[in-house]
Image: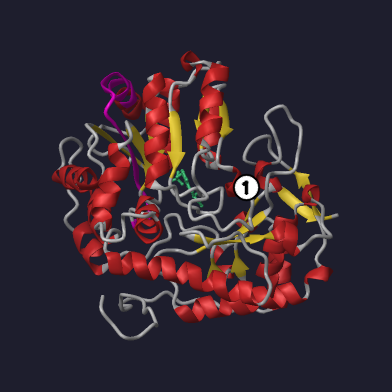
């Protein structure tokens, strides 16, 4: 893209629109009270700008909708599966490919097959479903991200990196026999959407190799990670994104993937690997829980949409716009003094709720309080990623999470710059009135994944 202009326009036109129903602050105050102050409980048509997640919310392209018409719904051996397979293998050339209905299904199958109760599984940071799938086997999930990754103010270019020295010590301490695999999440969602460098992927691989431990990548946002490598890592500025992606996966023995992120689709995922024994068991598990091995819980048309999505997500004009739009929101809310996780993540801006609301202690969920207020003030739905999400441990004890963040996740190709300008204005308004926000408590909570269904009220 050669242009003398600095404005990065959305590299698409809109063919089909969905109306947004406008609401007033008074209406939203009632709606969120009725939803027990849990944003997951709201009806989405009561939301103006929905930044709850970038997962499954992408707008599909005309080409994807066209491909959907070609979906072949044969139970076994559908040509749609083979188109999906070649699209995946072009980027991630693993020997065995197992389609699943979404990322957590891939995680569930993988950990059901490989994890045992005495196992410990290291990751830069486990996403909540990954952690829950590890723990549901009785195994322990451990996060070994670099120290800078836990410091919202650090400008480290690859804050998702694994702490290699910690990983070495971890392996010495627990012993190879207790570590069935090591994971790397790209980008590191729970740590702020921060990328992992190629150098760090290579270094993690080296440690794993030395101990004979397989390395799996949680690949959800692989294209965004590759774009960051191209922008920030020495030696990659001229490398085509697709080659960066191939190199990332060449260092791994397998991956789990949610096509709802960088697959640019509304559903789908896969598990891929080079380890034959595991693949055979995983495939059997797939047939038991998801479906036959050439559709895995998806329809042929979903597989077609993913195949096209995987071509579109690696287009450099798309990635340039994508990362620039996230950075745009981050830069503008930071300019009015809002504390954010720095630098901006790939798919989301993370507001540092602990610094935004220093008068609310972590065990009164400042992130939840802020997320609720953003909804009341402007109909924006974000997501608490902090003590409400991570503070409760399997033994029933509760501790503050490492950080209290509110994630504003930006759906792919869905909102325009005007929506983002509105978001900036609402966040700035809430920031000006931050002293009025109060802490929250759970009035009802399940034992696991409490942030999804728990009920909150003000303390
Ligand atoms: N791994 C990561 C890093 C994720 O961000 C997610 C989902 C998953 C695995 C699970 O994939 O949803 O297809 O089952 N993250 C979504 C989010 C839900 O909002 O960040 P899934």
Image quarter in which the N terminus is found: bottom left
Q: Of residues 63 and 199, which is closer to you in this image?
A: 199
Name the secondary structure under disc 1: helix
Horizontal and vertical percent for residue 174?
56, 18
Q: Quadrant of residue 170?
A: top right
Q: Which residues are magenta?
A: 264-282
- Relative placement, left or right, of 134 versus 205 is right
x 28%, y 65%: residue? 316
The residue where tag 1 is placed is 150
Q: Of residues 59 and 193, which is closer to you in this image?
A: 193
Q: Residue furthest bottom?
A: 4
Q: Of residues 317 and 309, which is closer to you in this image?
A: 317
Q: Quadrant of residue 432?
A: bottom right
Query: Crowding near pointer 1: few (<14 within 10 Å), some, many (20+)?
Result: some
Q: How is the image coloured?
A: secondary structure
Please say whether residue 256 is one of the residues in the magenta stretch.
no
Horizontal and vertical percent for residue 386?
67, 49
- Relative placement, left or right, of 382 versus 236 is right
Q: Is residue 378 visible?
A: no
x 58%, y 60%: residue? 342
Image quarter in which the C terminus is found: bottom right
């Amino acid at each position: 893209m050669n242009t003398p202009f600095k404005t990065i326009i959305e590299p698409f036109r809109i063919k089909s629109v969905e109306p947004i129903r406008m609401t007033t602050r008074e209406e939203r105050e009632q709606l969120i009270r009725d939803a027990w102050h849990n944003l997951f409980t709201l009806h989405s048509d009561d939301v103006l700008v929905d930044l709850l997640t970038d997962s499954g919310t992408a707008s599909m392209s005309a080409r994807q909708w066209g491909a959907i018409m070609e979906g072949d719904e044969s139970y076994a051996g559908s040509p749609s599966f083979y188109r999906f397979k070649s699209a995946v293998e072009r980027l991630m050339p693993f020997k065995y490919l197992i389609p699943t209905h979404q990322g957590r299904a891939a995680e569930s199958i993988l950990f059901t097959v490989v994890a045992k109760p005495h196992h410990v599984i290291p990751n830069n940071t486990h996403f909540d479903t990954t952690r829950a799938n590890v723990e549901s086997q009785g195994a322990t999930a451990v996060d070994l991200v670099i120290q800078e990754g836990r410091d919202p103010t650090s400008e480290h270019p690859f804050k998702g990196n694994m702490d290699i020295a910690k990983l070495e010590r971890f392996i010495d301490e627990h012993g190879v026999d207790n570590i069935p695999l090591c994971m790397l999440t790209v980008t590191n969602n729970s740590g702020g959407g921060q990328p992992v460098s190629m150098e760090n992927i290579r270094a993690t691989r080296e440690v794993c190799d030395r101990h004979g431990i397989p390395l799996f990548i949680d690949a959800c946002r692989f294209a965004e990670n590759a774009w960051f490598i191209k922008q920030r890592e020495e030696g990659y500025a001229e490398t085509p994104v697709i080659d960066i992606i191939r190199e990332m996966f060449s260092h791994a023995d397998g991956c789990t993937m949610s096509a709802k992120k960088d697959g640019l689709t509304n559903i789908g995922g896969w598990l891929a690997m080079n380890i034959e024994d595991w693949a055979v068991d995983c495939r059997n598990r797939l047939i038991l829980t998801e479906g036959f091995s050439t559709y895995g819980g998806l329809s042929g048309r979903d597989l077609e949409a993913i195949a096209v999505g995987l071509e579109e997500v690696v287009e450099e004009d798309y990635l340039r716009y994508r990362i620039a739009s996230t950075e745009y929101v981050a830069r503008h809310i930071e300019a009015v003094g809002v504390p954010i996780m720095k630098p901006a993540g790939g798919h989301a801006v993370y507001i540092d709720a602990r610094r935004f609301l220093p008068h609310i202690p972590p065990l009164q969920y400042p992130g939840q309080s802020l997320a609720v207020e953003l909804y009341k003030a402007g109909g924006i739905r974000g997501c608490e990623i902090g003590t409400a999400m991570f503070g409760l441990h399997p033994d029933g004890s509760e501790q503050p999470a490492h950080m209290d963040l509110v994630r504003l996740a930006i759906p792919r190709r869905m909102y325009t710059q005007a929506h983002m300008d509105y978001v900036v204005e609402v966040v700035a308004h809430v920031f000006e009135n931050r002293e009025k926000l109060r802490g929250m408590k759970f009035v009802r909570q399940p034992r696991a994944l409490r942030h999804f269904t728990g009920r909150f009220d003000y303390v």
